[in-house]
Amino acid sequence: METPNNRQHILDEASTLRWEIGENLHDTLLESIYQDAARVSDRVVTRVGEKPRFDWDRTLDRVLTSRWLGFPLMLVMLTVVFWVTISGANVPSGLLAELLIDTFHPGLKALASNAGLPWWLDGLLIDGVYLAMAWVISVMLPPMAIFFPLFTLLEDFGYLPRVAFNLDSIFRRAGAHGKQALSMAMGFGCNAAGVIAARVIDSPRERLIAIITNNFALCNGRWPTQILIATIFIGALAPPALAGLVSAGAVVAIALLGILLTFAISWALSRTMLRGEVSAFSLELPPYRPPRILRTLYTSLIDRTIFVLWRAVVFAVPAGAFIWLIGNIKISQMSIAEHAIGFLDPFSLFIGLNGVILLAYIIAIPANEIVIPTILMLTVLSARMTGIGEGSGVMFELDDLAATMNIFNAGGWTLLTAINLMLFSLIHNPCSTTIYTIYKETGSVKWTLVSSLLPVVMGLGVCFLVAQLWRILG
Amino acid sequence: MTTQLASLIIAALSTTVLLLIFWPDAGYFWRWRRGLASTKRVLMEDALKHLYDQEYNGLICTLRSLAGSLAIGGDEAASLMARLQELGLVRLHHEGFELTAEGRKEALRMIRIHRLLEKYLADETGLSETEWHKRAERLEHNMTEQAARELAAAVGNPSYDPHGDPIPTPGGKLPPKKGVPLTELEPDEVAGIIHVEDEPNAVYAQLVAEGLHPGMTIRVLEKSAQRIQLIADGEEIILAPVVAANLTVERLAKGEEIKGPFETLTALGVGEKGRVLALSHHCRGQQRRRIMDLGVIPGTVISMQMTSAGGDPTAYLIRGATIALRKSQAEMIQIERLKEAA
């Protein structure tokens, strides 16, 4: 019979016994679950002739993770992936640019003037919105459509976990996870994709580190900037025979600086801001399996390429409109853009950049791809050059390096401006697509702010230092 | 030239100043914020905890012990005690002070929050042992009852904190004190550590450095007024009596011999096998759950497969899956080596 009295007695007894359980209740529970499971599986599962486990796997592993061959093989594999991406993307990128920018754009303009659209509507929609979108698509789509499937194939095959396995000792010293090698490599394609790729890191602290430092992997949108500036300014310093080599060397140096910064910032973050986050390492090395090519193509195109591209387009549309508007709305005889450049110039020149560059980085925040077209347009606008470009507020690029050089000269660029632009292109805030992705992935305003502001402050600092030293030594 | 130098110097100075102010935790800004938090209420709550500690350990609380524990002056201690008496939380008792029923309830509430926080910091953050207590001391004063209940649920309603101290129930119940200080053991006696006192910090840091933790079995080898020599997990440790007094132990039957030293997973060469004996106490929280979820529990047979090209993570075959573990993790898994035939 249950009386209130003996119920109280039972409760008291229970709470006394609670202290006897000790603190390892969860361990004991898990152990007994495993034991039960093992007993059940031993009874119902028969194992036929235990063969040596996946001999082929073991041999492959021994080669791919060996002390002598592991790293060279990895370098070769990555070089091949990058080479295929860059050389493979050239042609379709050119075709797309020709189609979307050189053919469709004038076509649309003609159509609009036939339809009698007011100039401002046609400018806003076609020169602003359409052009920004077309630019992002033509520069972004081909490399991503090649890089992501290749990467996914390597992942599917089981090679990428071995890369993480091999590189973990280096990343460990920086307080990071070996799998950050993968999100970093993905970042060379696109930082937004790299941030998403950091999901594979299951330890909270290391995942945040990978997300915050992903921006230091020089993304696909920034390579063209680096190559253009290096060719025009750095290559020109060397004798013509060596120009190509020197400018390529400068671009590689910037990319390597990015990797170096990744480690340095990872190290610093894991010891300061992120010290309190949990760290729990584990890395599974799945068995090798033949990649499922069609499935890989489908998922990497839909999940990664189209997904990232869509986000970029969504951000590029309002930016295109904005860029066109500030080039065309005039206040007391000057466009808003010129006012802004005048306002930014003193500070920008002081840190060895110029107002055009800073303004371009502010308004071209949706995608690094449109920074150079914006810089060219703003330079022509502010230097009041005529006969070059497509008119105020319309982004453009020139095929002719000498003509591009002329525009930069008219904008008052020096070697210092070029070097600082290359540095700032590496070390500045991530593009708005990436910022939004970081927010989605971390769900935290704090970490989104840290990963956006930390690099831009660093970049301004680096430019400042270089400019002062340059002026002292030069 | 001079303007550039000047601007470099100004930049360097302002960066230094900013770093000094905002450096996480140690910066002046954070210290100033913490200073604001150290109010009269905080002191009163700390005083109640001290009173309860003394009572639990069968000691008497005096003004002097209070001033020592809170690191405040004698005058301040006196006015603090007067205020607590006014509020009816403390009353005079023989030569010292004791808690009233109301005061005990309040003290237990604070102790519960403190120990829950320590458990939380140990399991759910990456902070090291020596920081748990300090952080908990700071955080405990700003927690509502509701937040405490949520915290308890988040860490699985634990009954002990990571130092082995029981956590009071929401109703304020605690089990009677168990065990004796290590200093009371005689040579050859075997005992289990049930509690490692976390104050003062320097002493605690020393105990942590020696690898001593609740749940360990020890045997006293030698004892003198200057030092106590003991064997724990197969390793010999020498402690000063003042340090040893911060360990609470429970005597075990004399015959019970302690095992060890244990080999860890790191001792295995390629292709060698071992059976898991235990997971070290230092493997806690999410890391412990992760490793156990992978199937590393006592009895599991693990074989070493390969070392990475970089030398550190090593891949082990665990229940049919190849899992890479870092050296620091493999060191926390104690094993017995199996012969080749097994």
Image: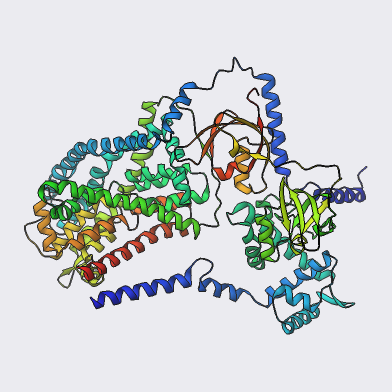
User: Quick one: which residue is furthest to the top in this view?
Assistant: A49
**In the visual, does B113 lie left or right of B52?**
left
Q: Which residue is drawn at 80% across and 52% down?
A: B220
In this rendering, position of residue B152 left or right of residue A268: right
Q: Which of A468 and B191 is in front in this view?
A: B191
Residue at 47%, 50% in the rendered image:
A173
The residue at 72%/50% (across/down) is B236
Q: Which of A232 and B226 is in front in this view?
A: B226
Q: In this view, does A467 lie to the left or right of B319?
A: left
Residue furthest out toward the bottom: B75
Quadrant housing residue B175: bottom right
Where residue A119 sits, quadrant-wise, is bottom left
In which image quadrant can residue A65 be found?
top left
**How is the structure coloured here?**
rainbow
Left or right of residue A77: residue B114 = right
Whether residue B150 is visible to the viewer of this picture, yes or no, is no
Q: Is residue A4 above or below residue A92?
A: below
The one nearer the camera, A388 or B72, is B72
Q: Where is residue B290 in the image (x, y as percent from the top left)?
A: 59, 42
Residue A71 visible (yes or no): yes
What is the quadrant of the N terminus of chain B in the image? bottom left
Q: Is residue A428 above or below residue A143?
A: below
Rendered location of residue A366, percent (x, y): 31, 53
Residue B184 horizontal/vertical position (percent)? 84, 58
Residue B292 percent across, percent down from the top left:
63, 39
In the rendered view, would you say B313 is above or below B138? above
Q: In which quarter of the image is the C terminus of chain B?
A: top right
